[in-house]
Image (spheres, helix red, strand yellow):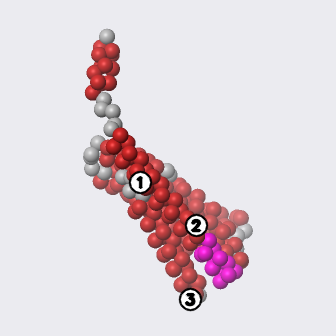
Amino acid sequence: MFGVFYLFFSAAAYNEPTPEKVGEKMNRFLQGTLVLLISGIILKILGFIYQIYIVRTVGTEALGLVNMVHPYYISLVILATMGMPTAISRLVAAKEAEEKNTAKIMRVAFTLVLSLGTVLIAAALIFMPPVFDILGFDRRLRWCFYILLPGVIIVPLSSVMRGYFQGRRQMLFPSVGQIAEQLSRILLGGSLIYCF
């Protein structure tokens, strides 16, 4: 009997969203989708241009060396990230809906990512050289791998920030950040290739 009264009164207290609120949510959703679409297209074009530049400048051998090490690097990044952007996005969205502070979520996420990234880098520095020796990799591969290692901390940190802004439904900041990251990769990589 109590359950029936509870359902009745909770249903009566439910405020149906007005058409204006539904339209506003749809408008924000469409804006976010448009921003992500445009930034995705820009990122693909920049990546394509960068790949062409790399192949023409350093040749296929150097690119092949980097691509041989890349799966090991990506494995470490995946372990360091562990689905953090999605989890943070959900937690931040829930806290925003309750109008609560999200600072604790971000502190815990940053601490976890930094700790895990540091442990993974230390483990990679200890265990990957023997793995490379066992697999018979070229000595140059070690340096390619070592150069990529700082990304094991940098990429998860940017993923945490991306999850935060997506949880707040602010798609512009992650999109601009990804474009800036790609541009800095092009400028830094291009200048290092040119100098060496």
Q: Position of residue 134 (x, y in %)?
A: 70, 64
Specify which label sits upstream in the sequence, 3 or 2.
Answer: 2
User: Which callout, 3 or 2, points to the residue nearer the camera?
Assistant: 2
Q: Is residue 106 above or below residue 10?
A: below
Q: Is residue 166 visible?
A: yes
C-alpha span from label 2 to label 1: 21 Å
**Residue hosting label 2:** 44
Q: Disc 3 to disc 2, how far (Cα)?
A: 26 Å
Q: Decide which of tag 2 and tag 1 comes sooner along the chain.
A: 2
- Within 10 Å of disc 3 (Cα), the crowding (few <14, some 14-19, many 20+) is few
Residue carrying label 3 = 195
Q: At numbered mark 1, what does the secondary structure look like: helix, strand or loop?
A: helix
> From this viewpoint, which residue is outermost toward the bottom?
195
Tell me where the magenta segment starts and ends, as one range. 47-59
- For label 3, the SS is helix
Q: Nearer the viewer, residue 123 or 12?
A: 12
Q: Amino acid at mark 3?
A: Cys
Which residue corresponds to mark 1? 166
Q: Secondary structure at mark 2?
A: helix
Give the residue type that dot 1 points to. Gln
| Residue at point 56%, 89% (across, down) | 195
| Magenta run includes residue 50 | yes
21 on left or right of 74? left
Task: Give the percent coordinates (x, y) of residue 11.
Answer: 32, 24
Near-viewer residue (40 or 2): 40
